[in-house]
Amino acid sequence: MRRSKTGGPRIGRSEIATLAVVAVLTALVLTGCAPGPNDVGAITPPEAQAGFWLGLWQGFISPITFLVSLFNPDVNIYEVHNDGNWYNFGFMIGVALAFGGPASAGGYATPGRRKG
């Protein structure tokens, strides 16, 4: 393995190109998950309303949907035709998972410090 002047591993052009392709493909796949416009009318029958599982999914993809909504006025982050509290509960769990969930609480794996 080649080393840089600072002693770390040297990254070649092929590795940089591979990382760029992977990053672009990942971005395309994630933006494909964003929900589109809601074509359902103002009066929505109960069986067509978004429930817990759709709330969970839409909460999980909310960071991507937010970025898409900045450039497309037809995309919304939150489903307005939902069944109420169960959709909200799923949405909030999805948002928590998208932003790291319990793992982002910090300090959960921090070893204790010795004094002395």
Image (cartoon, rainbow, N blue to C red):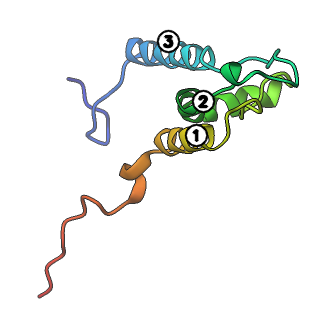
Residue appearing at x 37%, y 60% in the figure: 106
Mark 1 touching mark 2, by CB under 8 A?
A: yes
Mark 1 or mark 3, which is nearer to you?
1
Does label 3 or label 2 sit earlier along the sequence? 3
Q: Nearer the viewer, residue 86 or 61?
A: 86
Q: Nearer the viewer, residue 43 or 87?
A: 43
Q: Quadrant of residue 62?
A: top right
Mark 1 touching mark 3, by CB under 8 A?
A: no
Q: Is residue 27 left or right of residue 81?
A: left
Q: Is residue 19 left or right of residue 8?
A: right
- Give, as a three-letter code, the residue at label 1: Trp
Classify mark 2: helix, strand or loop. loop
Image quarter where the N terminus lies is top left
Residue under label 1, please give it: 86
Residue under label 2, please give it: 51
Mark 3 touching mark 2, by CB under 8 A?
A: no
- Give, as a three-letter code, the residue at label 2: Gly
Residue under label 3, please give it: 21
Q: Nearer the viewer, residue 46 or 58?
A: 46
Image mark for residue 99: none
Q: Position of residue 88 (x, y in %)?
A: 62, 42
Mark 1, other Cα within 10 Å: few <14 / some 14–19 / many ≥20: some
Mark 1–mark 2 distance (CA, rounded to whole Å): 6 Å
Instruction: Give the residue at the far front of this rendering.
Output: 46
Classify mark 1: helix, strand or loop. helix
